[in-house]
Amino acid sequence: MTEQQLKTLFLRQRQSLPLRMVIQMSIRRIVAWREYWQGLGKDVYVSLGGKDSHALLNLVRTVYPDVPGVFVDTGLEYPEVRELNRRTPNVIILKPKLTFAQVVEIYGWPVVSKKMAQYIHEIQNPTERNKNTVRLRTTGFRANGTFSPMSKISDKWLYLKDAPFKISNACCHIMKVNPLRKFAKEANLIPIIGTTSDESDTREHNYIRYGCNAYNTKFPVSTPIIFWTEQHVLQYLRENDIEVASCYGQQVQRTECKWIFTGVQRTGCMPCGFGGHLEPRPNRFERMEQTHPNMHKYIMYGLNGKEVFDYCGIPWRQEQSCFAF
């Protein structure tokens, strides 16, 4: 068994543990993280957003009640999320330099996935310096002639290189990551983030590579609940009576072992198109038309999101019966 396979096995074992055990494991990592950085004259903060980060903030404050939360208000999160984070005690509110409208005009729309959006952005902006990259993204062949299928835009999305709008993965970095890093540098604080590995393959890969506490990366970060599952998070929220944004709805039990929220399952910037093509109908944009009609109108008509989503084959209003492609 390889080292990566062994680490993946350990992750699966931790994901199967009862909540009380993963709580204790996470607390040990939180304590180790803060003690390490305080020993270097720094301190920590919790990056705040949706329900997972509120579970984390509560957990951190069971040990360290003084740890601040930090929320980047882009103006395009669900209004219920913005409202809750603004009235949560000891939370610092940051603002990005650019608006979403400016980001999509300068860099491009976030559609399909971060990886595909990056690849498409690269070939939408060819230069003499990146010609090898453009070839790699379109054909999968490196300059030395070797084939790398994972470095290529999938055939399904290759047509997006000719889209009449820009595409990019830069939005989250510009609107959220940059303000947080600037704040952290000025405040001498190191982040604790409430991501879980079952949200994406990338997060699972990062956990396997760096563990929970990444001390030696360019931008150190702690993800102490990375090995929690969605069910761990929901159980923690229930048992500790933690308030979450009302757009999530109520927790209901679907099976003996599965609970879900009746409203939105994930929050974030409302115009984001990442993963929109994978969602069952009605998808987030179709539901948004009913629950947040003013924001839906702004995204689709004010930002011209309807053209983007039509071109990508993502339904955005409920009367649409099929994909555009």
Image (cartoon, grey):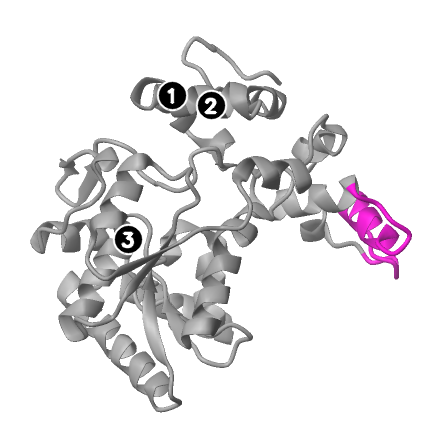
Image position, residue 309 (x, y; %): 56, 24
Is residue 302 left or right of 188 when viewed as pictured?
Answer: right
Name the element at disc 3: helix
Q: CA distance from mark 2 to mark 3?
A: 28 Å
Name the element at disc 2: helix
Residues tagged 2 and 1 counted as in contact (Cβ below 8 A): yes
Image position, residue 24 (x, y; %): 18, 73
- Give the amino acid at mark 3: Asp
Which mark is first along the chain, 1 or 3?
Answer: 3
Q: CA distance from mark 2 to mark 1?
A: 6 Å
Q: Which residue is mark 2?
A: 298
Magenta highlight range: 125-146
Query: For this rendering, which residue is in front, 296 or 205?
Result: 296
Q: CA distance from mark 3 to mark 1?
A: 27 Å
Does residue 197 appear in the picture of this structure? yes
Q: Which residue is mark 1?
A: 294
- Between marks 2 and 3 in the image, the one whose residue lies nearer the viewer: 2
Q: Quadrant of residue 117?
A: top right
